[in-house]
Amino acid sequence: MRNIILVSMVMITLFIFIFVSVDKESILIGDDHEIIERPPLNQVIGTSLRLNNNDLEKLKFAISNVKNTRFDKPSEWGESVTGVIQRISTEEKIVSLTFDACGGEWGSGYDEALINYLVAENVPATLFINSRWIDENLETFLYLASLDQFQIENHGTEHRPLSITGKTAWGIKGTSSVDEVIGEIVTNFEKIKELTGHSSRYFRSGTAFYDNIAVEIVEQLGMNVVNYDILGDAGATFSATQVRDALLTAKPGSIALLHMNQPTKGTFEGVKMAIPLLREQGFTFVTLDEGFNLSIR
Ligand SMILES: [Zn+2]
């Protein structure tokens, strides 16, 4: 009799284990292709994304699907069009700091003091890095990618607004076709992948402007567009106190947009003032992945 009870308990445990397991997807991520389990991202952040495992073969397949899709004309243009993630859905007191490195003639600097501070204070952050910045700062890029506290993500190839019709934002002409949208995303994806082994999961365009079809294309390629709910340094034009005050508006799940490529501006001093104050208020800092994982309930 005791044996029957024991066998039944083992069977029930096994059944529960299998039932729980099939509810998740095994996905390939990270530098070493470690297999982790988590629910599909569309459950986490409520987009149309089906998968988020961007191996190059899968990406190639997704690209050919996009090229064979007949898209409608875009109906939205801006920084918060349909599909753009602006914050992490959570009640936890977490903030995700994101730092863009834009590249180009005026955008290839490196705010070493800022990064050293984040390292010394062990503040996790997500770094959205453009192809041109990587080319200008290769050693630094590899150093940043080697640190666990930083998540490297995709800030485009030529730093263009993401449009299928060539719309302009802040005086920068956007991509003007589906092919150019794909190129803006994929060329930098491949560069980051080749240098670090990491598959980008999040995309932010130069200027953070998109039309809704371009956002749909990002999702079809297996990534999500992540913008912000806190304009942290307004393109590195804010003074230190403006940066501090912007960051102090943080709410649970806020995503702050800042820059790590303008060492002569107020960004670092503002961040340095805000971080201890936010910690006093009970906030902790997370990478985007950590944040989206915490949003699972
Ligand atoms: Zn930028």
Image (cartoon, rainbow, N blue to C red):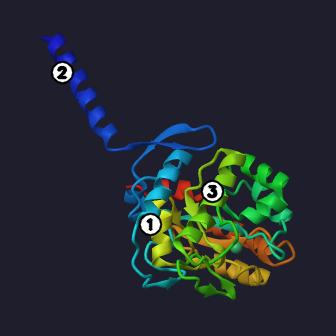
Look at label 2 and name its amino acid: Ser
SS at mark 2 in the image: helix
Question: Residue 130 appears at what percent x and percent y?
Answer: 71, 65
Q: Quadrant of the N terminus?
A: top left
SS at mark 1 in the image: loop
At x 79%, y 71%, the residue is: 268
Q: Is residue 169 left or right of residue 296?
A: right
Quadrant of the rendered image containing residue 273: bottom right
At x 85%, y 71%, the residue is: 263
At x 72%, y 50%, the residue is: 145
Classify mark 1 as within 8 Å of ligand 1 or not, answering yes or no.
no
The 10 Å Cα crowd at callout 1, few under 14, some 14 to 19, many 20 or more, is: some
What mark, if any, has residue 189 been given in the picture? 3
Q: Are marks 3 and 1 in contact (CB under 8 Å)?
A: no
Most foreground residue, 63 or 154: 63
Look at label 3 and name its amino acid: Phe
In this view, 197 is above or below 212: above
Of callouts 3 and 1, which one flags the residue occurring earlier in the amino acid sequence?
A: 1
Classify mark 2 as within 8 Å of ligand 1 or not, answering yes or no.
no
Question: Residue 18 appears at what percent x and percent y?
Answer: 29, 33
Classify mark 3 as within 8 Å of ligand 1 or not, answering yes or no.
no
